[in-house]
Amino acid sequence: MIFKGSATALITPFTENGVDLNAYEKLLNFQISNGTDALVVLGTTGEPATMTAKEKEEVMRLAVKTAKGKIPVIIGTGANSTATAVENSVMAEKIGADAVLVVTPYYNKATQDGLIAHYSEIAKHISLDIIAYNVPGRTGVNLLPKTFARLAEIKNVAAIKEASGNMEQIEEVIRLTEGKADVYSGDDSLTVPTLAMGGLGVISVASNVIPKYVSDMCKAFFDGDIKTSAKMQRDMLPFVKALFMEVNPIPVKKMAETLGICQKYIRLPLTEMTAENTKVLINAYNELIKG
């Protein structure tokens, strides 16, 4: 078990000239002090595709330095080149990560056998636990339950972040891998349903700005207060829908900017959230916080 409960898929604060390391450190501490159970660095929400190798290393080192020994640090190391994913994963281990998050190879659209070979090769080169990341809406390839069941036989393939949005698929993954690998929700709207099926937590976008809420929702579930947890899930739905009105992480960075967590910078090809959608987002946040 890498973590149980709520992990945050962290944004990366930028300045006009680079990574805003001061803001990033404050974000890390904000998460730790508000009950987040693990940190995911350089996942999709962190915009790693637009960052230089130097910037990525700075972020990784700062996250490990700030959070090591407090909560697990999981570093996104996936790539559409297996060799690059191996190189990234080896670096993450050397820096001191607790686990790596490895997305399926995007654009190449590997076969299921190709996915087996990809993750197997990475697993050979590191001793860290691997969380496979299935997000077919972004990558163009779906890591099928029976394929992940095969991967779960590999010692350090420990979990999957399931962001297919398909509850039946998530249920099947849990059924096939129970006792062999953990399953985390990759969709904020499906956290409690995934926990109810036997999932162990969520890797959340929303918890960048509402970390205590997401943490408390998970804790309520695991404490046996299913009614409260389910109501919290329902109550946050309008905010979650607003967070994905435009491509992630555009809305969550706009919300973080509004709350003073980061500056306005988001990197092309992503663009500023429209004024109309920003109003909807802020209103949904305010309604959720007012309770």
Image: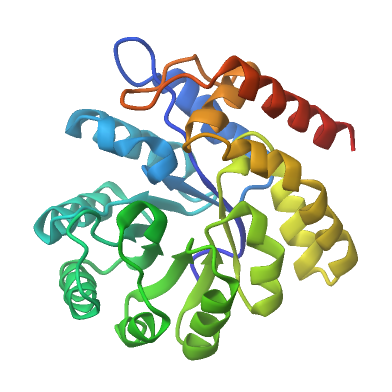
Residue 225 in view: no
Taking depth in this image into account, of 69 and 235 the one nearest to the observer is: 235
The image position of residue 240, as x and y in percent, is 66, 43
The image position of residue 162, as x and y in percent, is 48, 66
For the point 81% across and 68% down, the residue is: 223
For the point 62% across and 52% down, the residue is: 188
Taking depth in this image into account, of 281 and 38 the one nearest to the observer is: 281
Q: Is residue 82 above or below residue 264?
A: below
- In the picture as drawn, the residue positioned furthest to the left comes out as 83
Q: Is residue 173 above or below residue 274?
A: below
Q: Quadrant of the C terminus?
A: top right
Judge left or right: residue 272 versus residue 185: left
Taking depth in this image into account, of 279 and 25 the one nearest to the observer is: 279
- In the picture as drawn, the residue positioned furthest to the top comes out as 16
The image position of residue 35, as x and y in percent, is 68, 47
Q: Quadrant of the rendered structure where residue 48 is? A: top left
Q: Is residue 117 above or below residue 20?
A: below
For the point 34% across and 50% down, the residue is: 76
The image position of residue 201, as x and y in percent, is 61, 64
Judge left or right: residue 18 versus residue 202: left
Q: Quadrant of the rendered structure where residue 280 is? A: top right
Judge left or right: residue 280 versus residue 163: right
